[in-house]
Amino acid sequence: MEYAIVDIETTGSYAAGNKITEIAIVIHNGTHILEKFQSLVNPGAIIPFHIQALTGISNEMVEDAPYFNDIASTVYNLLHKRIFVAHNVNFDYSFLVEELKNAGYSWRAPKLCTVRLSRKIIPNQSSYSLGKLCQNLGIIIHDRHRAMGDADATVTLFEKLVREDKENLIESTLKKTKEHRLPTHINEDDFLKLPETTGVYIFHNATGKIIYVGKAVNIRKRVLSHFSGTNGTQKRQAFINDIHHIDYLETGTELMSLLTECKLIKQYWPTHNRALKKFEPKFSLIQYTDQNDYIRLVVSPYDKHAKAIQHFERPYEANQLLLQLMEEFELDNKLCYFYSVHNEPKPKLNYATLPNVDQHNEKVEAAIEKIAAQSKSFVLVDQGRNLNEKSYILFRNNTLYAFGYFDVELDIVDYEDLVKEDDKCLSNYYMNSLVLQYIERYPSKVKKLLHKAAIDYPID
């Protein structure tokens, strides 16, 4: 068993928008060092001043250094089929996955984090940062915040962890983090190309038909979870056996992944997406005209055939709105019905005691108009799939109309001009609710629309 003990220096703290400026790799067999590699890397971008101050790596130092693509084959061969070890491992790992992917290499490896292992094997330390931990353990770091200096210190720390691992925590950690074997009929290349980003994954059957759509904060991890575990039911096995090809769409945000998932499910109605009831509201405030021409207002369980004024998740909210309308517009309570779990029979009406039908209907229509006048229209602008774009969600008259992406450099006068044909969607209650709940949490992301005449957009 061989380990690649790695440290990198970078232009910033996250892989999607930053680059490697230096890399050091030490190949180790658990007892001694086998090989070393170190190189400065030209990031193709300016190194921020505070990063220069921290690492001592200046723009002049990397000016003549190789780009990562120039050393990608060497790095890949050193990392390939070895266990990846680093202090705060996910930082270094995410950068190398991104850089290797950009250079045309699909690479994944089992990981060990010396921070997590140190917490278990050497407990009760005041700090587990590499500098403080090494200082407390008497490990000397030469060239702190330089790749090989930190890598050498991590090697010494790792050797100490191996020696003091009396409970075989390293071995058990590797067993937990080892990637599961894919079913033989699934193309491994499909899986290897999956990113560890937020988005939607799509399963196809042998003929290419979409059979399942799912959303994920981490696409690769979520897809892998479908093939792990011990659930061997016939239903689950039939599902797995039906998967022959995996595709994905990155979305940038979880909200965009939820909306994209809904849009694709409504478009393709995949065989294995069974939780479709979530797309429907639970209750509605509906109107109907009785045989004596009175317009009635009723709170009832959702019925797609009924003429709904507004949909609700809970009956309490619907009952409260109806009560508010009754009080404000002085609606006769004998012509309005609240929802009750007891399903009490409605009393027989004596029409002689009711108000004039025209006067009553005018009040009801005024109440309905008030609800319509309170409809929301806005644009929600959020982060995109990369630093060069933003996402947008266009909401008109209480209805999600379109969502998509635009270039950050675009000079926007009217957000409705962003809408492309593929961005439009046939909305539903669930999708609308997702957006409205999101803007309650993040009101600063909402932009006003230019005033336009009201347009009726469809909702099913």
Image: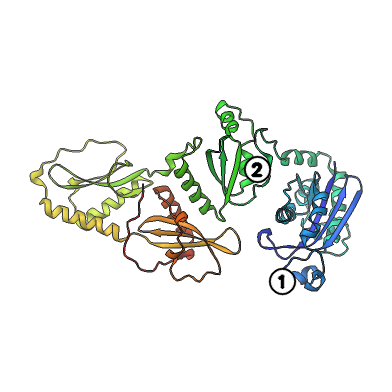
Mark 2 nearby-residue class (10 Å; few <14, some 14–19, many ≥20): few
Amino acid carrying label 2: it is Asp
Q: Label 1 neighbourhood size at 10 Å, few (<14), some (14-19), many (20+)?
A: few
> Which residue lies most toward the front here?
207
- Residue 407: image location, x then y, percent: 55, 65
Q: Residue at x 53, y 51 (%)?
A: 257
Of mark 2 and mark 1, the one earlier in the sequence is: 1
SS category of the residue bearing label 2: helix
Residue 332 visible, this angle: yes
Of 455 and 438, the residue lying toward us: 455
Q: Nearer the viewer, residue 27 or 321?
A: 27
Across the whole image, how many numbered discs are drawn on residues? 2
Q: Are marks 2 and 1 in contact (CB under 8 Å)?
A: no
- Up the image or down, 265 lies above or below 6; here it is above
Q: Is residue 126 above or below residue 298?
A: below
Tag 2 residue: 190
Name the residue located 80 percent from the left edge and 73 percent from the top edge: 60
The residue where tag 1 is placed is 48
Q: CA distance from mark 2 to mark 1?
A: 37 Å
Q: Position of residue 70 (x, y in %)?
A: 80, 59
Residue 136 in sight in this render: no
Assign the N terminus to one quadrant of the image.
Answer: top right
Residue at the left extreme, as displayed: 352
Badge 1 marks a residue whose secondary structure is loop
Label drawn at residue 185: none
Q: Residue 437 at x, y = what percent?
A: 45, 54
Q: Nearer the viewer, mark 2 or mark 1?
A: 2
Residue 9 image position (x, y, % from top left): 77, 62
Instruction: Left or right? Give the position of 326 relative to 304.
Output: left
Quadrant of the rendered structure where residue 52 is? bottom right
Q: Amino acid at mark 1?
A: Pro
